[in-house]
Amino acid sequence: MIPTSFIDYKQHLSLARRLHSEAVALTAERYVMHHRLALDRDEVRLACLYHDLCREWKLDALLQYTEQKNLMVSEEERRTPVLLHGPVAAHLLKKAGFSPAVTTAIRHHSLGSPEMGLLGVVLYI
């Protein structure tokens, strides 16, 4: 299940961040299998591989994108701009055709939210 406007995460992440994301994906896949969670395996993998897509952006770029796109973010996220990488990545990936489950999980992976869904909980853990 590749989104319609495919974005290659490997081109947007440093080697260290890419290895982190791939390790998160492996851990999440094992967690889902172990607990027999009813989640789409492809969505689990996509959420994990892409959750830090914008983590290496400069803080001013995250703030600028958030303001330009009028993204709804919390005051805590605004005060701590590194937290904006989740909402920004979710917005970009939604535009690229990623599923609502994946983008919602990515949106809330740093602080958590009652809206994050089971996929979001797995990513948050």
Image (cartoon, grey):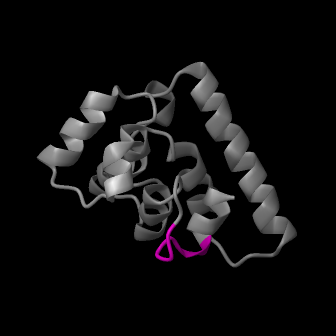
Q: In the figure, is residue 56 to the left or right of 48? A: left
Q: In the figure, is residue 42 to the left or right of 65? A: right
Residue extending furthest top?
A: 15
Give residue 74's position: percent from left, percent from top.
33, 59
Q: How many marks?
A: 0
Q: In the figure, is residue 33 to the left or right of 118? A: right
What secondary structure prevails in the magenta region? Answer: loop
Give residue 112's position: percent from left, percent from top.
53, 63
Residue extending furthest right?
A: 34
Q: Is residue 116 magenta?
A: yes
Task: Say if 35 sits above or below 23 in the image.
Answer: below
Task: Please give the name of the residue rendered at 40% of the width and 43% of the height, measured from the top-left corner.
Answer: 85
Asked if residue 1 can be seen in this view, the reply is: no
What is the magenta range? 113-118
Give residue 84's position: percent from left, percent from top.
37, 45
Task: Please give the name of the residue rendered at 34% of the width and 25% of the height, measured from the top-left corner.
Answer: 58
Task: Please give the name of the residue rendered at 54% of the width and 54% of the height, measured from the top-left corner.
Answer: 47
Q: In the figure, is residue 27 to the left or right of 121? A: right
Of 52 and 46, nearer the camera is 52
Asked if residue 54 can be seen in this view, the reply is: yes
Task: Say if 77 sits above or below 11 in the image.
Answer: below
Of 90 and 70, nearer the camera is 70
Task: Please give the name of the residue rendered at 13% of the width and 45% of the height, measured from the top-left corner.
Answer: 68
Task: Say if 44 sits above or below 56 in the image.
Answer: below
